[in-house]
Image: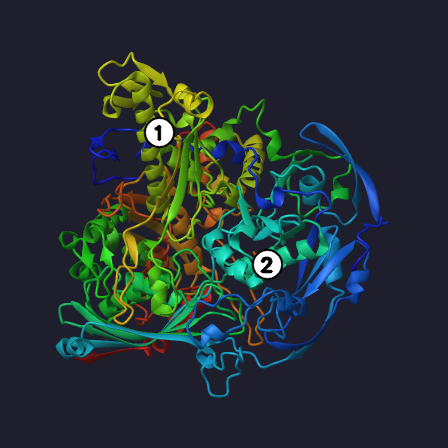
Amino acid sequence: MSETTTVTQPIVVEEGETRPGYAGQNVPRKEDKRLVQGEGVFFDDVKRHNMGYVHFVRSPYAHAKIRSVDVSKALEHPGVFGTMTGDEVALLTDPFFQISSPPGAHLKDFCLAVGKARFVGEPVAAVVASTREIARDASELVEVDYEPLPVITDAREALGEDAPVLHDDAGTNLTWEGVYEWGDLDQAFAEADRVVKISELHFDRFNSTPLECNGALVEFNRGTGQWTIITNNQFPGFAAIMMGPAMRVGLDKLRFVTQDIGGGFGNKITSHPQLVACCLLARKLKRPVQWTEWRTDFHLSMSHGNERWFQDTEVAVKEDGTLLGFRTTALDDAGAWLRYEPLGGVIWAQVTPGMYRWRHIRLDFKQVVTNKAPVSPNRGYSRMQHLWFTERIIDIVAHELGLDPVEVRKRNYIKAEEMPYETPNGCIYDSGDYSKMLDVALDLIGYGELDAKRADAESRGRLLGLGIGSTLDSGTNNFGQSRLINPELQFSGNNEVATVKLDIFGEIVVTLGTTPQGQSHETTASQVVADILGCSIDDVNVRAGHDSYWNSHAGFSGTYASQFAVTGLGAVKGATDMLAGEMRKLASVVLGCAPEDIELAEGQARMKANPEAALPFMALGAIINANNAGLPEDLDVTLNCRYVYRPPFDPPDVERKYGNLTLTYAAQVHVAVVEVDPETGVYEVVGYVAVDDCGKRINPQVVEGQVMGATAQALGAATHETFTYDEDGNLLTPNFYDYHVPHALDMPPLATGNIESPSPFTSMGTKGMGEGGGAGIHAVCAALQDALSSRGKPIVYDSCNPYHRVWELLSDPEASRQRVRVEAG
Amino acid sequence: MEGNGAHRAVETSKTITVEVNGTTYEREVETRRLLVHLIRDDLDLTGTHVGCDTGNCGACSVILNGTLVKSCMLLAVQADGASIETVEGLAEEEQLSSLQQAFSDHHALQCGYCTPGMLMSATALLRENSSPSDEEISKAIQGNICRCTGYWNIVKAIRAASGQEVTE
């Protein structure tokens, strides 16, 4: 199924040395043995004596004043250990630090609602009891007196003069705005032969719904004042800097522990409010507390993806389809709180021009708050919305000007020979060959037989369409981009940590700072280590998960935003190179030669000239750790090497909004073929191809697994998955009954392909990847527009197209066509 | 001081006996306790997972008296006297079953959260149908949600475990 069309050299595992090894091979996953036996340890598997179960009392109103909260009846209920309310929280904690510049900076966000509830499902109080069931029962006894307020569920209405304001502290629902402009728009539109105007496009609200919901087991050590938080938060570095100041404690008081995590996809970054509530309860009630989020609670309250409207778009185009530039307004719906926002207001700019060469771009980003669940990162975070938009432009332009979408792409794609390519806003696309990827994809889908397939479908009363989605997965953030949101912020660069040591009996032990959720870090890290040390991957013990006490983490540690292959493995390589150097140095002292005379191979340190003179790793480990008398005083060897990988970044230019925002740019070209029943709008994806390029692949099977997963999530988002609210702010899809994620029978036949364009900016040529699903959302949109073209040329204007929306396009194509106008330039 | 900290005995409880993976357990449970919580919290067999609260996701799938069930859709008391198989019972003497091995070989799991339920559904399928088609496999795991893999490799692994050829 997989096709590699470019073969690159074996990976360079040591400076100046190339040798084939585990890197690039599909080795069995180290994680699998425990997971297929049900012996993984997820947070909810951990128990403590006398622990209490936390249940949150949640607001049934989308917007309401909280007049009073009475917990007395709940406290009387047998088995209840205690409660907590917003009033207590307001005394015990400070509001969470806000990333935003004013007015968003003024929001006062606590772990429980204080004074006002702003979305259905917002935690208002917490109850702790001896069982999950009793906690739930008792939470029903908490009496909250609400005064309902007018509700905003549509971002477009949030800016109205009479709109109710969610946060009086901000004084407006427009919590952040930034105008981005690069190039010369006037010139671009003056040069244009055609101006394509698109009044409004909509990227829908959904998320990746990891199968394991959020949660934690929290213990408070009264003697030391430290909390141990056994959780599935996927970005402990971020959680810590949010929680410490709010709880008025230093970061040493917060110990995060994780082993296995049941999927994350970005949705488990912003659980810090609930973790603070658990910390306060553990301290107050003098017992461990356990919180496992219910599925309905997850849907109601956690981590929705950013919903975005693209308004008043104008595209400058030459007669031949050359794209010069565009201008638009992006209206982003953040929901009720800015938990990770407004970072979405700059993250999109990592991929400002998409894959295309246009140089003149203006985007006015407006983010508003509404009475819906707070948004936070979701696989493809913020770039997915923007890339869907740029892809929509390509296909609408092609559609309206009668051009071939393949030709328009090829004409405008950044060319392989232009790499590394500096985008209009200073990002450096490291490598890639987008046209070639498209060729591979079209070949795999059987593009040559498209007309015959169309005719065949027609003979069966079906409309067949083909659509392309070509996107980028920018990885390894330069956190300096946060300064484009708020110049006061003191974040920049990025880092990740690994520690590699050799222990007494020759055990190689690797400790990561990351929090994998299925990305196979134990496996790929062992591949890198084994290649450098010249041993078997079976000899490499990679600790599962994350623990602050391991001291193998830094400020940005975690697993998010497509970076492990660069930051995580970069740290692993750095630490292992250090260890290898120390092992050579130690062996040279013992064997009486120079370190350069020593090689590491077959689990030994041996003299290159005389392989018989060898020390097994066990001897090296034992000498340093347990038998070190007589070693030279100046021998600087610990065999315990900690390395902090730091990517090469400069802070961006805040004035010009200019600079490299991520280190690597993996690419995806996906093609979908759909068949539509014109009578009903029901359609099926009948063929699908995903071609990816993430540079050097350490483990191709793991990479393909990420591609498959991202594709499946894209198909779900494109066809069914939506967080829909009624006008009162009730979520209509609060569980897996109403929120339909793909099931096995929904999956189309899939072919994958890849090319490898090694990144010149990373030590192993790797690129971060895993978030490439946005390509699939667009591919389905484009395929639908192609399929329906013969029925009045409707315009696909929404990222999510359930059958009813397709039926609407079929039954009233003109309504959608009202959105598009082509004018002479 | 809020609450008295004591867990008073609940009158609506019942003593039940279940056999799980060949071991017999006797437990007093609240009559409203879900079977999945008996398995996870009272018997400490935490391989069986919870992924939803509506019976849709299948992470809690177990085999009860030979029939595949979602253990969140049964009360523990309904399992009184039953023989239950969970994921912990699939491997023998640390030797993975051919199905478990196939899941690893074909990268049919990533985070591993849905995997126990998938394995139980597939086990039930292969007992009834030793040579299922891809369509039959997909239908058999239709009640199991996986958010990581897109199911393609799971279907392939189950097919391989049945001894049928799969394309790489």
Residue at the extreme right of the image, as rendered: B11
Specify the quadrant of the image occupied by residue A662: bottom left
Instruction: Say which chain tag 1 marks.
Output: A
Q: Does A393 appear above or below B28?
A: below
Secondary structure at numbered mark 1: helix
Q: In the rendering, which numbered label is found on residue A276?
A: 2
Dot 1 surroundings within 10 Å: few (below 14), some, or many (20 or more)? many
Q: A433 or A513, which is in the foreground?
A: A513
Horizontally, residue A541 falls left or right of residue A122, namely left
Quarter of the picture holding the C terminus of chain A: bottom left
Q: Return the residue at label 1.
A: A530
**Residue A753 % position (x, y):** 28, 44
Q: The residue under label 1 is which amino acid type?
A: Ala
**Residue A561 % position (x, y):** 39, 53
What residue sits 16% from the left and 75% below the top?
A188
**Residue A194 % position (x, y):** 18, 76
What residue sits 18% from the left and 57% below the top?
A421
Residue A570 in sight: yes
What residue sits 33% from the left and 63% below the top?
A481
